[in-house]
Amino acid sequence: MAGRRHVFISHHHADDEHVTKLTDSLSRKGYEIRNSSIRAKPANKERLAKGLVSDKAIERLLRIKMRWASTVIVLIGKETHARRWVNWEIQKAHELGKRIIGVFTRGGTKADIPPAFEKYGSDLVAWNPDAVIDAVEGNANIDFKKPDGSTREPVHSPSTSRC
C-alpha cells in the first residue's frame, strides 16, 4: 500500500508529538505523508505567546500551507475542541474544498471533537494507520468512528472531493 499525499495536519501544538507519531506510523506502512502544517519552534512559540505575531499573519501563512495540501487531517486530542486555530483551519479547509479527516489521538474522546469538524468533517477514524490511509484515499464505506474504533453516526453528509 504505497502512496504519497500532500496533507495539512491540523493540531493543538501540545500534540506536536502526535504529528510525528502519525507520519512515522504511516511511513512504516509504505505511505509517505508530506505535511505542510506549522510546527512552532520554541522561539516562535515565545513570540506567539507574547502576541508579537498578528492574527492576519498567522491566517495568511495557514492559507498558504493549506492550499498546497489535498487533504486536511485533524488530530483530535484532549484540548482540540477548545483551540481557536484548529476550528479556523477546519473552516478554511471547508472553504477551500479540502477533504477533512479526523483522527483521534490516544486519549481523545468524542467530547474533544471541534465544533467545526462536527459541521464539515469528511471522515472520523480511530488511531489506526490503515484507517487513516483509507480515509485519506477517500475509500468508500468508511464510517465515522468513536475513539475506540466502533462506528458512530456522522453529523452530516460531507460535500468535498479528493484532489
Image (spheres, rainbow, N blue to C red):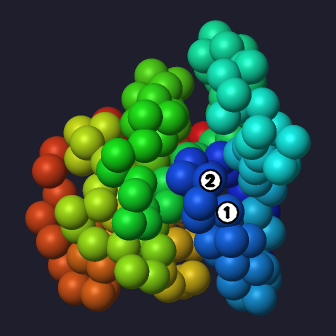
Q: Does residue 101 sit above or below 3 in this rendering?
A: above
Name the amino acid, label 1.
Answer: Asp
- Left or right? Give the position of 36 relative to 124: right
Q: Residue 13 — which label? A: 2
Residue closest to the eye, 148 or 1: 148
Name the amino acid, label 2.
Answer: His
- Left or right? Give the position of 49 relative to 118: right
Which residue is rendered at x = 29% and y = 87% of the image? 148
Q: Name the residue under label 1.
A: 16
- Left or right? Give the position of 87 relative to 48: left
Residue closest to the eye, 65 or 51: 51
Q: Does residue 79 sit above or below 128 in this rendering?
A: above
Q: In this orientation, does residue 26 appear?
A: no
Q: In this orientation, does residue 119 appear?
A: yes
Q: Which percent across, then down, holds residue 9?
A: 62, 52
> Residue 117 lies in what quarter of the image?
top left
